Amino acid sequence: MTTLIPQLNSDLGEFADRVRKSLVQVTAGHHGSGSGVVFNSDGLVVTNAHVVSGKGRRRSTGDRLQVTLPDGVVVTAELLAKDEDSDVAVLKIEGADGDLSELYPIEVGDSRSLRAGQWVMAIGHPWGVSGAAAAGIVIGAGPDLPEAPGEGRDWVAVDLALRPGYSGGPLVDHQGRLIGISTMMAGLEVGMAVPAHVIQEFVAKVLAGGAGEGDAALA
């Protein structure tokens, strides 16, 4: 027991550091900012649609935004697609095939097998604090959650206070694998995230050329 807690702290700290390598900050001009996560080595970044829109500004596919990488380098990214209903957006970092700093795509976990009580961690940039972390447990997952915004879409509910700036950032499991994108608070105590499988399917649709502005996310 005397070595269990120090070892656990060490393990959690190490995988949080690993996840931070995939964490970026997305800035929508002077209208606000949020988090995002590097999804593949080609420079795709996933975040929330409301993050790229900022405060009250409507953005269209093809618009450019600023993305700050974990090493502090600021790059430009193109908005490839977004879905307001599921609150997902896909960006492409310009120059990702050139002399850009090395990207670290996040490992994706199995969000379909999530169960209530499982441990999760959210990492993001709340209130401008870089790489902050918050941990909790899964309350539930699926389309029938009472806190879920809208009907018929899969969500992950967690007992985390997802403060402004966590939006668009990774929600990971105990192995640091992506199981959702932090999205919003539903009441005072319930955080909501878009499940990783919804994001994977939307990204696949984008890469196949079948998604653009306003397309419905798959659930």
Image (cartoon, helix red, strand yellow):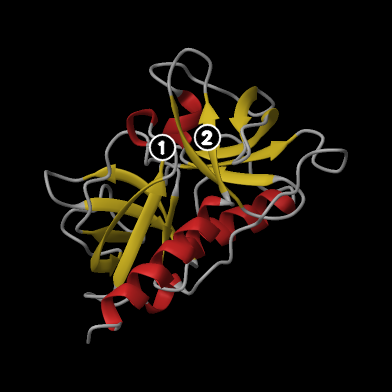
Label 1 residue SS: loop
Task: Kindly identify the residue that appears in the image at 53 percent across and 15 percent down.
Answer: 29
In-front residue for pair 24/141 = 24
Confirm whether residue 218 shows in the render: no
Q: Are marks 2 and 1 in contact (CB under 8 Å)?
A: yes
Q: Nearer the viewer, residue 8 or 80?
A: 8
Picture layout, residue 185 above or below residue 5: above
Crowding at label 1, few (<14), some or many (≥20) Cα neighbours within 10 Å?
many
Mark 1 or mark 2, which is nearer the start of the sequence?
2
163 relative to 22 in the view: left or right: left
Q: Amino acid at mark 2?
A: Gln
- Pick out the residue farthest to the right: 98
Q: Residue furthest top?
A: 30
User: Mark on residue 25?
Assistant: 2
C-alpha separation, residue under disc 2 versus residue under disc 1: 7 Å
- On-image quarter of the C terminus: bottom left
Q: What mark, if any, has residue 125 been given in the picture?
A: 1
In depth, the one of 17 and 89 nearer the eye is 17
Q: At x 13% / y 44%, what residue is drawn?
A: 187
Evaluate whether residue 217 shows in this view: yes
* Residue occupying the point 52% across, 25% down: 27
Along the line of sight, which residue is nearer the eye, 217 or 195? Answer: 195
